Image (cartoon, rainbow, N blue to C red):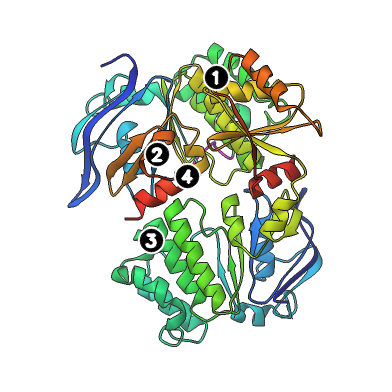
Amino acid sequence: MDNLNVIEVEGLTKMFGDFTAVDTITFKVKRGEIFGFLGANGAGKTTAIKMLTGISNPTSGKAKVAGFDVFNQAEDIKKNIGYMSQKFALYDDLTVKENITFFGGIYGLSRAQIKEKTEELITELDLQEIANQLASSLPLGWKQKISFSVALLHKPQIVFLDEPTGGVDPITRRQFWEMIYKNANNGTTIFVTTHYMDEAEYCDRVSIMVNGKIEALDTPKRLKEQFEANNMNDVFLKLARE
Amino acid sequence: MSITVKHISKSYGDLNALKDISFDVKEGELFGLIGPDGAGKTTLFRILTTLLIANKGIATIAGLDVLTDYKSIRKGVGYMPGKFSLYQDLTVEENLNFFATIFGTTISENYDLIKEIYVQIEPFKTRRAGKLSGGMKQKLALCCALIHKPKVLFLDEPTTGVDPVSRKEFWEMLKRLQQKGITILVSTPYMDEAALCDRIALIQNGKILEINSPNEIVKKYPKTLYNLSANNMYKLIESLKSYKHQYSVYPFGEFVHYTDNRNNFNLEELQFYLEAKEHTNITIKIAQPTIEDVFMELAK
């Protein structure tokens, strides 16, 4: 595997009975890249992400994530990636600190490391006042920021973000993206899905899935040129409304 | 007035979910409540649909009081909650039939109203609601909320988590319902949808920040806004944030939206500053503010 590529996918396919949810998709994601993974509801994004994160077995094709094969090294993949989704961020009935400790443990950090990381996160995100509050009492934007940091606790090479900013207020949404930029700049690969088309513009490259296939993949600038569109929203509408 | 809200407040324990909310929605108007999660939108919807009682204030729907006339209100309004609330183990058709029967009507009686939406899910009418895709659930929920021909329609975040294509179709559908004389109160966290409403209220932390037509709201933006771009956007944001004259710096699609804290300022000075920070391909242009810019300014 090329050292520069953190994800290499070739002809990856997933079928449920007669239905082809993901249809021979092929792409590569480079180290430190912000890769936008877009598509309409039902286009196959979630199924593809499940295969890439080692949760679901592909029907055919090849894929390597963080240097590991999705077919027979799924457990290694899980240890070397971070994951957060809009639907599940933190355990509501644990405090912020307890959540950090819990996820640190899950990701195999030692007690000393967890302690160090906890202090680090609390300072970095300004959590002093809420560190001992239940996660359920926090605004969504806070939860998402903490959840993102927690997904990075074990310094994964790549982090999968599944609609991380849905419903988050506009200012926090931007703070979240600044965190993404910062981590990408430090070499973490970001694989992100979103329904906010302005966020698609923040990505280095964007792929758009339609009916299980990747129908477009390029930088936002070149996609706009290719589809003669003013913005990514128009690109998306042109592609997905066939 | 189709909906009047006067000084409504609601708290849950120490949390003030709504703080002295007042606004009106005219008959036949498409009115948007625009705000993020936790703004209080759902609490307000539940009060207006008589499912929750406010601590203070009064509200009327089509002239009926939400406290004393709750039974009549329930017959005359349609409500699509943010969370999918249909019967998962009934089929599409059974759900629709159930709601029609509850409201003392039949599917055929008001079929005209839902036809356009229902034909899209009709091929799946024998499928259980729990097995539908997100987009289809949303369409079925809208049909169920419309089947008794309500005068006022309440839609709580109908497009959250929905892709841009389906969102666009959903709003086209709302416009057509509005033309049939239905008053619509709709909430959304997507600021770009605000422009599609007749009037909007921007809401955050239980308070209304502004009420007006989308055009008027955008006109009120107090600053000159600039679109900036350069080769490395992350470093551009960092440089701008450490610029001593910056008032606000927000990534905004392919540009960074920038405002300066001086009334008159020399663009060249900013250009030099960025060049000194080794940025290349710098562009600086005046930009039109959007509702999202106004929202961020008001929420700052």
Q: Which residue is mark 3?
A: B130
- Distance from the alpha carbon under mark 2 to that under mark 3: 41 Å
- Disc number at residue A230? 4
- The quarter of the rendered structure image containing the N terminus of chain B is bottom right
> Is residue B72 depicted above or below A150 in this figure?
below
First in residue order: circle 1 vs circle 3:
3
Label 1: chain letter: B
Q: Which residue is mark 2?
A: A225
In the image, which is nearer the foreground, mark 3 or mark 4?
A: 4
Task: Name the kind of residue labelled 2 in the image.
Answer: Glu
Quick check: can you spot residue A5? yes
> Is residue B158 depicted above or below A92 in this figure?
below
In the image, which is nearer the foreground, mark 2 or mark 3?
A: 2
* Circle 2 residues within 10 Å: few <14, some 14–19, many ≥20: few
Label 4: chain letter: A
* Circle 4 residues within 10 Å: few <14, some 14–19, many ≥20: few
Q: Are marks 3 and 4 in contact (CB under 8 Å)?
A: no
On screen, residue A223 versus residue A150, left or right, reads left
Residue span colored magenta: A88-92
Task: Name the kind of residue labelled 3 in the image.
Answer: Gly
Q: Secondary structure at mark 1?
A: loop
Label 2: chain letter: A
**Which residue is more in the foreground, B48 or B70?**
B48
Q: Is residue B92 magenta?
A: no
